[in-house]
Amino acid sequence: MKSKILFTLFFSALISLQNVLAQTYCMPPSGNQTITSSTGNFYDSGCAGLNYSNNENGTMTICPTATACVTSLTFSSMALADATDILRIYSGIGTGNPLLQTFQGPVNTTSFSLLIVSQDASGCLTALFQSGSSGVTAGWVATIGCNIPTALNEIYTANLSGSYIAADLAGNNFLNINLSSPSSFTTTIFSVDGKKVSEKNYSLAGGQHKIFLQTENLPQGIYFCRVEGENVNKAFKFIKQ
């Protein structure tokens, strides 16, 4: 009986440990690794308690678990030994995508907050870390997030059956909206960092409608369109090509 109790306690502790470790992601010292996660902590190869090592050349790609958001990294600590130690963050899958941020030593900064958000259609971020041979230190601490503009957080899961955003052959984005009854509503477009870029009001009869969005002057990237009014309340993620 005692052995059974001890086994049960050990198994429960092991499961709890696995749950904790599942939320910790450490940069590989070499090679490429891809994870799918919208929560957790992202560290250098030394993880939470050790230094990274000399002569590293590793890549980590982090993709979101949900199509409703894009990956973000919030850095709160950064320690790199010298100029040969460099962490680069790219928007998208792989290092061939646009470079969003470069951290280069020597640096030793704690208690700061720097948010980096994917601008790529995949919603992913890729981190590349390369270290030299002349010294090591504590590395970094970052929090993985699933970024949705604050204005959309509460309504993103609301229903609007049969409605979607697409693009025509010319690259113009349009909202195909299915109204169950006549409705007056507002479409508001936000950039991925939560800034409002356009707004327009509509009053339409019930049925299917094709509304062209005001995106022609926007740079390429990920955007969110909020539709709010009578009997409609939803947000859509879309890509401006």
Image (cartoon, rainbow, N blue to C red):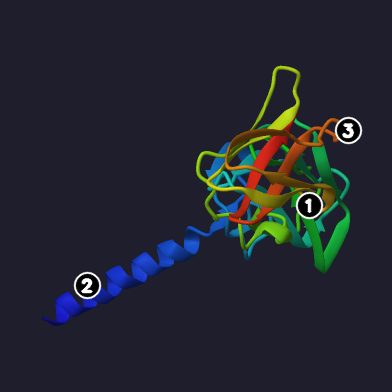
**What residue sits right under mark 2 in the picture?**
7
In primary-sequence order, the first of circles 1 and 2 is 2
Q: Residues within 10 Å of mark 2 (few under 14, many from 20)?
A: few
**How far is disc 1 from disc 2 in space, using C-alphas?**
49 Å
Amino acid on which disc 2 is placed: Phe
Viewer-proximal residue, 117 or 29?
A: 117
**How far is disc 1 from disc 3 in space, using C-alphas?**
17 Å
**How far is disc 3 from disc 2 in space, using C-alphas?**
63 Å
Q: Residues within 10 Å of mark 3 (few under 14, many from 20)?
A: few
In the rendered image, residue 95, in percent from the top left (x then y), is placed at 72, 32
Image vertical order of residue 105 relative to residue 96, above or below? below
Find numbered disc 1 in the image and state the secondary structure of the residue it sits on: loop
Label number found at residue 193: 1
**What residue sits right under mark 3 in the picture?**
217
Whether residue 196 is visible, yes or no, is yes
**Nearer to us: label 1 or label 3:** 3
Amino acid on which disc 3 is placed: Asn
Find numbered disc 3 in the image and state the secondary structure of the residue it sits on: loop
Q: Residue at x 85, y 34 (%)?
A: 219
Amino acid on which disc 1 is placed: Asp
Viewer-proximal residue, 114 or 7?
A: 114
In primary-sequence order, the first of circles 1 and 3 is 1
